[in-house]
Image (cartoon, rainbow, N blue to C red):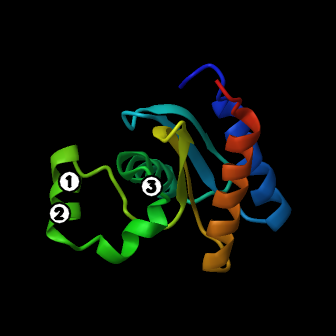
Amino acid sequence: MPPTIDPTRIIQGALDKARELGIRISVAVCDAGGRLVAFNRMDGAIWASVYGCQGKAIASVAFARPSGELTERAGSPIIQGIVAAEGGHMIPSQGAVPIIRDGVAEGACGVGGWTPAPSNRWNITCWASTAIRSTSTAR
């Protein structure tokens, strides 16, 4: 991650929002190559959320867009081919936002775990996005 982006603050922003909503999540931040740079699993979060948050973050940075925008096309041969070529770690589903600077994806933040309503996943991801913006500074 570039030194101007603080993955720890991004994760803390998502965790704070999850606590506010009374839910348990896992949250991951990856770099431009989809490699994990920071991670946290809240006590009581489902174990599958460990993989879900990372996979969504990988998809988000790979396509430089929120992972939820990929959901509709997830079954397309192109997306499936890229997922297979990447090793099957990518999850093109709602729950991650890219970290964009000067039009380039430098990383992504993904959230996974049980929530009482699908809209909460988006709320947490948006909160993480706000944390991303607050840790970013202009070059």
Task: Please name the residue that numbered disc 2 is placed on.
Answer: 78
Task: Count up the numbered dots.
Answer: 3
Distance in Å between CA atoms under marks 3 and 1:
14 Å
Q: Residue at x 35, y 47 (%)?
A: 62
> In terms of image quadrants, where is residue 126?
bottom right
Measure how far apart labels 1 and 2 are at the Cα level: 6 Å
The residue nearer to you, when weighing 72 against 40, is: 72
For this view, does 79 lie left or right of residue 59? left
Considering only vertical position in the picture, is 69 above or below 99?
below
* 51 or 83, nearer to the observer: 83
Crowding around mark 1 (Cα neighbors within 10 Å: few <14, some 14 to 19, many 20+) is: some
Q: Which residue type does callout 3 highlight?
A: Lys
Residue 112 horizontal/vertical position (percent): 55, 59
Q: Secondary structure at mark 2?
A: helix
Asked if one can make out residue 19 in the rendered structure from this viewpoint, the answer is: yes
Relative horizontal placement of residue 103, taking residue 117 as reference (left or right): left
Q: Nearer the viewer, mark 3 or mark 1?
A: 1
Q: Position of residue 50 (x, y in %)?
A: 50, 50
Residue at 65% from the left image edge and 77% from the top image edge: 119
In this view, 31 is above or below 24:
above
Q: Say which label, 3 or 1, has the lower sequence index.
A: 3
